[in-house]
Amino acid sequence: MTKLRVGVVGAGMIGRDHVRRLTSVVAGAEVVAVADVDESAAAQVADACGATVRPGDRLIEDPDVDAVLVCSWGGTHEEYVLAAIAAGKPVFCEKPLAPTPEACLRIVEAEVARGHRLVQVGYMRRYDPAYRALRRELDSGSIGAPLMMHCAHRNAGVPGFYRAEDMIADTAVHEIDMVRWMFRTEVVAVRVLRPRASGNAGDLPDPMLLILELAGGVLVDVEISVNVRYGYDIRGEILGENGTAALGESGLVAVRRDGRLASPVAGDWRERFGAAYDAELRSWVTGLREGAAADGPSAWDGYAAATVSAAAQSSLRTGERVLISEIAKPALYDGSTST
Ligand code: ISE
């Protein structure tokens, strides 16, 4: 088959990184059009890969665009994803799918009305070799039935525009999606606790602790720290009835020297999850070229994560435990958390 012709909406940091992937890492795709509210940013990216610059809505309608990659600011995702669904085109949308459960639901409803899956959401941890190995271990039954999971998600620092809610909507949302996928079940309640704030945190409620209650009784605690300074650090350990399994530090060299043991710590998520980003886009492109059934994180997964995220943001404001209420899962998404 000829190459998949991709139109990219959003030429910011993650958009540029995905364009690099589609042009030099993933086989079988080419970037043919780029859109951004900042036309000069779009032109710079487009020039580098021989693409044309188009406004987002025109790019999606363009008959020369087979599939759409949405990497623009989160508040614009709904409009572009709905336009892609209306045009009948596959669309990969960066996380979160949309800022509110209501907006995600409109996407789910549009896709269900269309009758087949077109949307994939950029929850790349599902493609990370360490998380996949952990899930295989859990599935093997080697540690017995799971009881708890301990997670930490630490950023060295965050940009100036990052707000308190972003600690959940932009950061913890990765763990929210990951645990649904890891344990193949839904989150039923959430509570956010706050220790005293770090002196590095400015106005942010940093760190914070999310307690996620899963259907079936597994409890997950997630530490979110976004100003740890020492690097980007992602941890996860599952306690089972007969043992524990934790994310390994794959590919790291441990140096013992001068009475000390040292290993590098990643600087940011692009470094820590580089292989996962490559794998998610490779899977998207290959699946579309081969006409395979969509199996990546779905619009339903985007909706479910947004629902838990909204409940956690409410708990952050009130300090209360919040029950999660979701609509019934449409049949279109049966089996969609298997990737
Ligand atoms: C960022 O948007 C990401 O998606 C990263 O994975 C996360 O670690 C970071 O906190 C977010 O701001």
Image: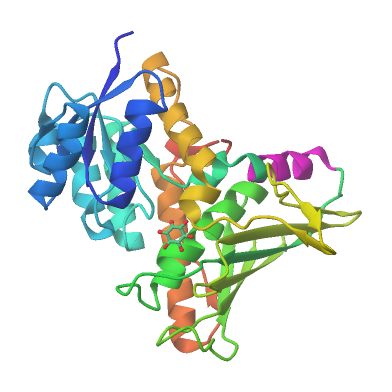
Residue 106: where, in percent of width, then height? 27, 51
Judge by depth and name the residue closer to the eye, 184 or 156: 156
Q: Nearest the camera: 304 or 70?
A: 70
Coordinates of residue 179 in the picture (x, y in percent)? 61, 55
Q: Is residue 28 left or right of residue 227?
A: left
Rendered position, 287 above or below 199: above
**Residue occupying image coordinates x 72% and y 45%:** 134
Does the magenta-highlighted stretch encompass residue 33?
no
Q: Is residue 132 above or below residue 12?
A: above
Q: Is residue 199 left or right of residue 51?
A: right
- What is the number of callouts on the image? 0
Q: Position of residue 195 (x, y in %)?
A: 60, 88
Does 71 sit above or below residue 170?
above
The part of the image, by quadrant, that contains residue 66 is top left
Residue drawn 70% across the image and 49% down it: 249
Ligand 1: quadrant of the figure: bottom left
* 186 relative position to 268: left or right: right
Q: Looking at this view, name the residue that lies furthest to the bottom.
A: 196
Q: What stretch is highlighted in magenta?
A: 131-141
Q: Residue at x 14, y 21 (%)?
A: 64
Instruction: Name which residue lies at 20% across and 33% down.
Output: 48
Q: Does the magenta stretch include residue 137?
A: yes
Q: Residue 85: image x %, image y %? A: 24, 36
Looking at the picture, tell me which residue is in the foreground, 331 or 194.
194
Q: In which quarter of the image is the N terminus?
A: top left
Q: Can you name the residue that lies furthest to the right here?
A: 242
